[in-house]
Amino acid sequence: MAQVLSVASDPSQVGRQPAGTRSSGPTREDLEMIERTCAVRDLLSSKWKVDLLYLLARGVHRYSRLYDNLKGASKKMLTDSLRRLERDGLVRRAVYAEVPARVEYSLTSLGWSATELLMNLADWADDHFGEVELARRRYEQASSEGPAGQYVRIRGK
């Protein structure tokens, strides 16, 4: 069952507390959700795993085809990434008794569900990455103005 963090309905109130109260810190549910999220992030954190999942979402591929499509990946890194994805249940490795042996890689149902997550991330990037870039430019501009430009003065403080 998915846990939902309670969030303020008004974004300007996020992180604010009523005067005179102290934060009790994250709840056990919050910490568990953070732990699960970090585990998934670590699952996909290798440089080539996301690329491999996208390539395999296009269909079954032999090792050489995957290697040809991952410019800059070494054979060792590709092999390690495929083995980890197989170990984690996202990729299926099929070996055919032919001469020479034919090995094909495909997504498992778990791998397909991971591509849904990646598509959601890609959609979020399409919708919001312009805002991220704008925020970065503003931050860099404020940082270049010196220490006074780095802080927002809050009235009354």
Image (cartoon, rainbow, N blue to C red):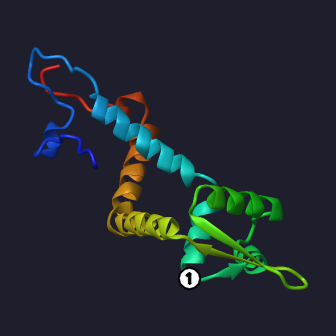
Residue at (74%, 64%) from the top-left corner?
78
Where is mark 1, residue-wise?
A: 58
Q: Quadrant of the C terminus?
A: top left
Position of residue 97 measured from the top left corner of the image (x, y, whole percent): 83, 81
**Crowdedness near tag 1: few (<14), some (14–19) or many (≥20) residues, C-alpha within 10 Å:** few
SS for callout 1: loop
Residue at (39%, 64%) from the top-left corner?
125
From what the image shows, is residue 147 above or below residue 136?
above
Which of the 4 quarters of the picture holds residue 154?
top left
From what the image shows, is residue 22 above or below residue 92?
above
Hey, which residue is sitting farthest top in the picture? 20
Q: How many marks?
A: 1
- Nearer to the camera, 107 or 52: 107
Position of residue 28 measured from the top left corner of the image (x, y, whole percent): 30, 29
- Nearer to the camera, 134 or 27: 27
Visible residue check, residue 12? yes
